[in-house]
Amino acid sequence: MSKARATFGGYYAVFVGVGLATALLVAGFGYFSTVRLKGDDGAVALAVGCGVSWIASCIGALPTAAALSSRPKQATTAILASTMVRFITALILVVPLVLSGWFDRTVLVLFVAVSYLMMLLVDTLLAVRMIRRAEDQKG
């Protein structure tokens, strides 16, 4: 991230884009086996599950992007806050969807879990890299 883009919007856009790419990769890897086993209903549940994780990732990225843009030395604490916000958001979104009966529950929960964990890993690694860069630029 260059100095010209070292703003909240720039950091946040990177998190959103990387999260979307991760969600699409997870969905791509799981699509054919899910359709073979569960049909089109499974594909819809897969997409919704990955979407839930992506939304949770986007909301969870807010504290980290805010800390990176203003106080990079406190960004490590912001990563912990982001993890909590992401988890609560995922629960708030997935529980009603599972209880609604609109989607195949097994596929939905499986892909929320898989995509959530993959996005958490990728976002954490990205945040650590951004923290190091931000500290180098400001320090």
Image (spheres, grey):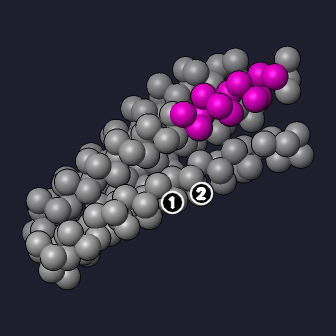
Q: Is residue 37 above or below residue 117?
A: below
Query: Residue 129 lies in magenta, yes or no?
Result: yes
Magenta segment: 125-136
Question: Where does the C terminus fall, quadrant-wise?
Answer: top right
Q: Is residue 117 above or below residue 96?
A: above
Which residue type does callout 2 highlight? Gly
Camera sees residue 55: no
Write the residue at 59% across / 48% down: 15
Task: Name the one closer to the observer, 66 or 51.
Answer: 51
Question: Where does the N terminus fall, quadrant-wise?
Answer: top right
Task: Name the one closer to the observer, 93 or 118.
Answer: 118
Q: Position of residue 106 (x, y in %)?
A: 11, 59
Q: Position of residue 110 (x, y in %)?
A: 20, 54
Q: Position of residue 123 (x, y in %)?
A: 51, 40
Q: Which numbered tag is attached to residue 20?
A: 1
Do the residues bearing badges 1 and 2 touch, measured as CB atoms within 8 Å? yes
| Mark 2 neighbour class, 10 Å CA radius: few under 14, some 14 to 19, many 20 or more | few
In the orientation shown, which residue stands out farthest toward the bottom? 40
Q: How many marks?
A: 2
Residue assigned mark 2: 17
Q: Position of residue 111 (x, y in %)?
A: 26, 56
Q: Secondary structure at mark 2?
A: helix
Write the residue at 68% across / 33% down: 130
Q: Left or right: where does residue 59 sit relative to residue 65?
A: left
Which residue type does callout 1 highlight? Leu
> Quarter of the image holding residue 67?
top right
CA separation in Å, label 1 and label 2: 5 Å
Q: Secondary structure at mark 1?
A: helix
Query: Residue 59 lies in magenta, yes or no?
Result: no
Q: Left or right: where does residue 42 sit relative to residue 70?
A: left
> Quarter of the image holding residue 93?
bottom left
